[in-house]
Amino acid sequence: MGRKLLLEKAHIPGIRSYEVYRREGGYASVEKALRMAPADVVEEVKKSGLRGRGGAGFPTGMKWSFLAKPEGVPRYLVCNADESEPGTFKDRYLMEFIPHLLIEGLIAASWALGSNRTYIYIRGEYAWIVDILEQAIAEANANGWLGKNILGTGFDCQIYVQRGAGAYICGEETALIESLEGKRGNPRIKPPFPAVKGLWDCPTVVNNVETLAAVVPILNIGGEEYAKIGVGRSTGTKLISACGNINKPGVYEIDMNISVEEFIYSDEYCGGIAHGKRLKACIPGGSSVPILPANLLLKTAKGETRMMHYEGLADGGFATGSMMGSGGFIILDEDQCIVRHTLTLARFYRHESCGQCSPCREGTGWMEKILNKIEYGKGQLSDIDLLWDIQRKIEGNTICPLGDAAAWPVAAAIRHFRDEFEWHVKNPEESQQRNFGLAHYADALTTV
Amino acid sequence: MADEIKMLKVTIDNITIEVPQGTTILQAARQIGGEVAPPAMCYYTKLKGSGGKCRTCLVEVSKGSEADPRPMPKLVASCRTGVMDGMEVKNITSGKVTDARNGVVEFLLLNHPLDCPVCDQAGECHLQDLSYSHGKEGTRYEFKRRTFEKHDLGPYIQLHMTRCILCYRCVFVADQVTGKRVHGVLSRGDHAEIATHIEQSLDNDFIGNVIDVCPVGALTDKTFRFKNRVWFTKPVDAHRDCPNCKGKVTLWQRGDEVLRVTGRKDQWGEVEDWICNTCRFEKKHVNDWVIEGPTKIDRHSVISQGHYTGLDKPKETFSAVHGGRAPKLLMDIHSVSEVNRPGIALSEIQGPATSDTFNIDKQA
């Protein structure tokens, strides 16, 4: 049984309201933080080893210490709640069920960073969560946790919620900042990084919802205590949103020292593959990370048990590993067709490319068209090599990581499931009749 | 000595130069010149914030700086990356760069209509130049190229959205030169397009400059539309006393007729001064201008065809080389040609002429 830090109180009746949240020990971390010097709060987060939960896994304490602090220039903290990665819905869960946890984390982080105006940039589709957050902010305001002179420290802070207009790209931090400024959500060219020139050209920190919420337990139990949970550089607990062909889809909080196998098959978590089918493949961290076939998912290339943490999932690099990403855990069973699946993802990235830089704008559309051709039985064997070449020329050559995110799923699908693509090309009619691809990937594998 | 600008040493393709702090890799490479300068489709020196989008100027930084010699993990856009002291950059000497650039050219041409034969930009098109220097001869794209609904931008500016490469230069011009922008980029991804949100014409005094900055034929001069090919026209530098702008322009003439007026462009295809709409669209008469002399055009440009400027004349005459002998023709084409029959009047032949028409012996 893993330790729960974020979702521990999420299911107490009425926890959404301030009274219940406060009664359950809420806002203790703010009381604690405001008695500390801001630099000490940053130090505490550094000690905790907390890594960004949005996908890249960059150490949060380090990110905070990079924030430029010029005299007379305001600094901003922006919470990235634009959770649009297919397969990821952990932030939604957190904000919907225990909104005060995020508000609490935001106030403590605002104090640490010296942000008097803090923004939550939320995905436009989460309209009802905006209401929940607004309600929570109003309650925090009424009880003196926000506004002027919080707890008599002289610190002013206000939180604003800004809705996005439905663009995946606005989850990229510089595109988010542009959008927050009221402009077209095009990613900026880095450097300068937001820590130096962010929102309205002022130093800005952009953090994921889960990262900011994790500040609360870090302050409550102490950074060193937090760092004891998990393994190595993967400290603390992580929310995983599991979906796909599993018995128990949902959001799970894990401490990062369980194996992937345990996560998928134990009754505490996913509860095994639905309908007694076999596991074929999995995307362990949201749609943009490389897909892994079952054999590489459960065991690394070296034959070790693959663990559910940053290093474990990344073991073997992109050749035989994947990434922790944002924690969107998508399971595909033996009936799922990898070609169709890759096409779906390619269509998504084509639709969401901002169109600013040429490799991503043109390349994503091209990949989708070729995959469409293969899926509908009109492909050629040379198309597979062409796809490989296109993704290679997109990856790393774009302004923001969306290009990489579009290229990786295609690359991994071809790398691990090339024969399935070939089967589609060679058996165009059969691939039309059966809506799924080859099932033999599941054959050689053991189930628990 | 506090305000003295620090000079930084940078090595690009094994050529070392010193540039002031704040210079980008692209600008440093342009100071070296020649092939070392990466191509740039979206960067424009005069437009703040431009660059970084087309990805043609990607270079490899094999040594970050003297202080931090680690190479940069990815290729970087040289137009937006500042030079560091002791930086080592690989442009044409890096296989990774040429490969990536090759890919970028392919991406840029993917949905480009390649209607160069009817495009007014042909001959001075940066995408043409880029394709010749860095592209492949064929395309691997086998789908329908994308099209757009047509937008009318008014009486002066013609928009061909299918040719656009979304460099955003015209957006920056409208922002920074005209002060009031009515056009912009709508939609996203591969359906992003340059347009006005509500159909309206661009009518600012300086909006004509979007034509000059457009690297392709997406924005062209309506008053020059289908009038001529640029390589048939002769560019001359001219000026006039203009109340709005400096009035320094290039006239593109055919005979005495002024077909087109543009800003003066430097060797990187960037205008030296913005010119106003009056100079560009209204003053189409030689009398309006004081002619300064022929414009220097790079001799490799197609515009130099038939312009005998900047040519090296041979030091010796032909007969001097041949020891006083007159040049001897290999054959007299007039005497051997089967076609050249002055006895046959083409206008009197019924239907199109064939080889039989000229074969008088056979007919007889």
Image: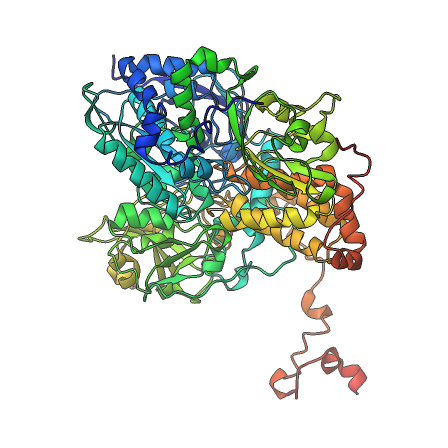
Q: Quadrant of the C terminus of chain A?
A: top right
Instruction: Please tell me how many numbered marks the rendered image carries.
Output: 0
Q: Residue furthest front?
A: A13
Tell me where residue A267 appears, x and y as whole percent. Answer: 64, 32
Tell me which colouring the rendered structure shows. Answer: rainbow
Task: Report if residue B181 is visible in the image.
Answer: yes
The one nearer the camera, B342 or B350, is B350
Q: Is residue A65 left or right of A202 when viewed as pictured?
A: right
Q: Is residue B48 left or right of B120 when viewed as pictured?
A: left
Q: Quadrant of the N terminus of chain A?
A: top right
Tell me where residue A88 appears, x and y as whole percent. Answer: 52, 39
The one nearer the camera, A77 or A153, is A153
Vertical relation: B251 (above or below) B359: above
Which quadrant of the figure has residue A410? top right
Tell me where residue A27 appears, x and y as whole percent. Answer: 32, 24
The one nearer the camera, B148 or A22, is A22
The one nearer the camera, A390 or A145, is A145
Which quadrant of the figure has residue A411? top right
Vertical relation: A278 (above or below) A116: below
Tell me where residue B65 appears, x and y as whole percent. Answer: 47, 17
Q: Is residue A430 left or right of A312 when viewed as pictured?
A: right
Task: Report if residue B84 is visible in the image.
Answer: no
